Image (cartoon, helix red, strand yellow):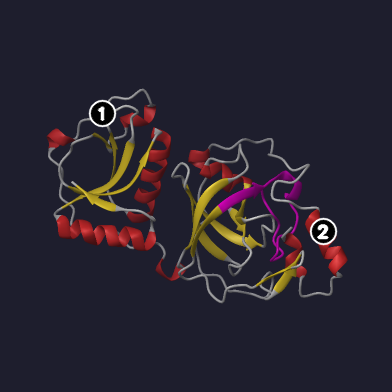
C-alpha cells in the first residue's frame, strides 16, 4: 500500500500501481505477527536525530487509488488524532517508500503526508501508552486511518492484539531534542508523604506510587483504570523530561490511577510546568493540589 511510493518518481502504470496497492491493506489477508513475541515494556523508542529530507519517498503530489496526497513542507507543529493500524510479517523485508527494508521489530511508521523521515510521538488515547517512531513509509490508504505502525510499535502501544486504536500523533522537533530538563522549582515532599498505597499489582511497589490526598502543587496529566497504563505514562514522562512523576491511587471504587508531575513549589511554578508539558509532551494537563 505504501512501500512502492518510493519509486513513484519512476514511470509506473496506473493499473500496476493500483494492483500493488490493492494487494496491501493495513492488516491485510495473509499478514500476521512474528514468531518472536515482544515485551511491550522493554521495547526501546526510536531515537530522534537530524536526517536530511531526500527525494526518496517525498514526491509531492502523488496519487493513490484515485486520491491525491501532498507531502507537508515541514513536520514542525504537526499534531493530529485518528485511527492507527499496523502491518506485520507479510511486509517484513520489503522496501519502504524511502528504499529501506521494513522490519517488524523496528520502531517505524507509514504516514500519507509527513516528510520522510520524521520522528513522531504516538499516544494511544485508549490506555495512555506512548511510543516514538520514525516515519519512513507512505500510507495507510485505507478508510480513515491516520498512521500505520510497525508490529513492534503497535505492541509497545498495547494494541497489536486487536489491530487498531485511537491515537494522537505529534511530530518531534529534533532541533530541541532531547527535551530540556525541568526548569520549574521542585520542593521535596515531607517524609510522611512517601507511604505507598497497597495494591496487588507489582507496579505498586514503585517509590513514585503515592496515596490520594498528598499535599503540594502538581500537574495531573491523566487518570487511568489500570496500573500498567499509568506506569507507562509515568515512565515515558520521566525518561523524556526528567520531571518527578507520581502515581496516585484513589480510595474510591473502581480505583483510578492519577499520573501527576511534581511536586513544585507554588501555583506559579505549577502553571509554568503545565505550559511546558502541553507544549511538548501531553495533550491534556491541569494543576491540582
Q: Which residue is mark 1?
A: 251
Query: Nearest the camera: 72 or 177?
Result: 72
Give me the disc on residue 19.
none
- Position of residue 69 measured from the top left corner of the image (x, y, whole percent): 67, 70
Q: Is residue 7 above or below residue 104?
A: below
- What's the magenta bit mostly, secondary-structure-wise? loop
At 63% from the left edge and 56% from the top edge, which residue is drawn?
A: 144
Q: Is residue 72 above or below residue 161?
A: below
Q: Is residue 256 above or below residue 80?
A: above
At 60% from the left edge and 40% from the top edge, which residue is drawn?
A: 160
Question: Which of pointers 2 and 1 indicates the residue nearer the eye?
Answer: 1
- Position of residue 154 measured from the top left corner of the image (x, y, whole percent): 58, 45
* Span highlighted in magenta in the image: 83-106
Q: Residues within 10 Å of mark 2 (few under 14, many from 20)?
A: some
At 18% from the left edge and 57% from the top edge, which residue is drawn?
A: 185
Placement of the N terminus among the 4 image quadrants? bottom right
Does the magenta-highlighted stretch encompass residue 224?
Answer: no
Label 2 – label 1 distance at C-alpha: 55 Å
Q: Which residue is mark 2?
A: 20
Can residue 182 be seen at all in this image of the molecule?
no
Does the magenta-highlighted stretch encompass residue 89?
Answer: yes
Q: Secondary structure at mark 2?
A: helix
Amino acid at each position: 500500500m505504501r512501500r512502492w511510493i518510493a519509486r513513484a518518481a519512476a514511470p509506473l502504470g496506473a493499473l500496476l500501481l493500483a494492483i500493488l496497492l490493492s494487494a496491501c491493506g493495513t492488516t491485510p489477508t495473509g499478514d500476521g505477527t512474528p514468531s518472536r513475541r515482544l515485551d511491550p515494556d522493554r521495547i526501546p523508542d526510536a531515537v530522534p536525530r537530524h536526517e536530511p529530507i531526500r527525494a526518496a519517498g517525498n514526491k509531492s503530489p502523488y496519487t493513490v487509488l484515485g486520491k491525491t496526497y501532498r507531502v507537508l513542507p515541514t513536520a514542525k507543529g504537526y499534531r493530529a488524532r485518528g485511527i492507527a493500524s499496523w502491518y506485520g510479517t507479510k511486509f517484513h523485508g520489503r522496501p519502504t517508500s524511502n528504499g529501506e527494508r521494513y522490519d517488524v521489530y523496528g520502531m517505524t511508521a507509514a504516514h500519507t503526508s509527513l516528510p520522510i523521515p520524521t520522528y513522531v510521538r504516538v499516544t494511544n488515547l485508549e490506555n495512555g501508552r506512548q511510543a516514538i517512531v520514525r516515519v519512513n513509509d507512505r500510507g495507510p490508504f485505507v478508510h480513515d486511518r491516520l498512521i500505520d505502525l510497525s508490529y513492534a510499535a503497535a505492541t509497545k502501544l498495547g494494541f497489536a492484539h486487536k489491530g487498531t486504536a485511537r491515537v494522537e500523533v505529534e511530530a518531534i522537533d529534533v532541533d530541541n531534542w532531547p527535551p530540556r530538563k525541568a526548569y520549574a522549582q521542585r520542593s521535596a515532599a515531607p517524609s510522611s508523604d512517601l507511604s505507598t498505597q497497597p495494591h496487588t499489582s507489582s507496579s505498586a511497589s514503585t517509590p513514585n506510587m503515592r496515596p490520594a490526598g498528598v499535599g503540594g502543587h502538581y500537574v495531573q496529566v491523566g487518570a487511568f483504570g489500570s496500573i500498567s497504563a499509568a506506569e507507562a505514562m509515568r515512565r515515558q514522562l520521566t525518561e523524556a523530561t526528567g520531571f518527578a512523576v507520581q502515581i496516585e491511587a484513589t480510595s474510591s471504587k473502581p480505583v483510578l490511577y492519577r499520573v501527576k508531575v511534581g511536586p513544585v513549589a507554588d501555583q506559579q511554578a505549577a502553571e509554568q510546568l503545565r505550559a511546558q508539558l502541553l507544549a511538548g509532551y501531553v495533550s491534556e494537563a491541569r494543576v491540582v493540589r
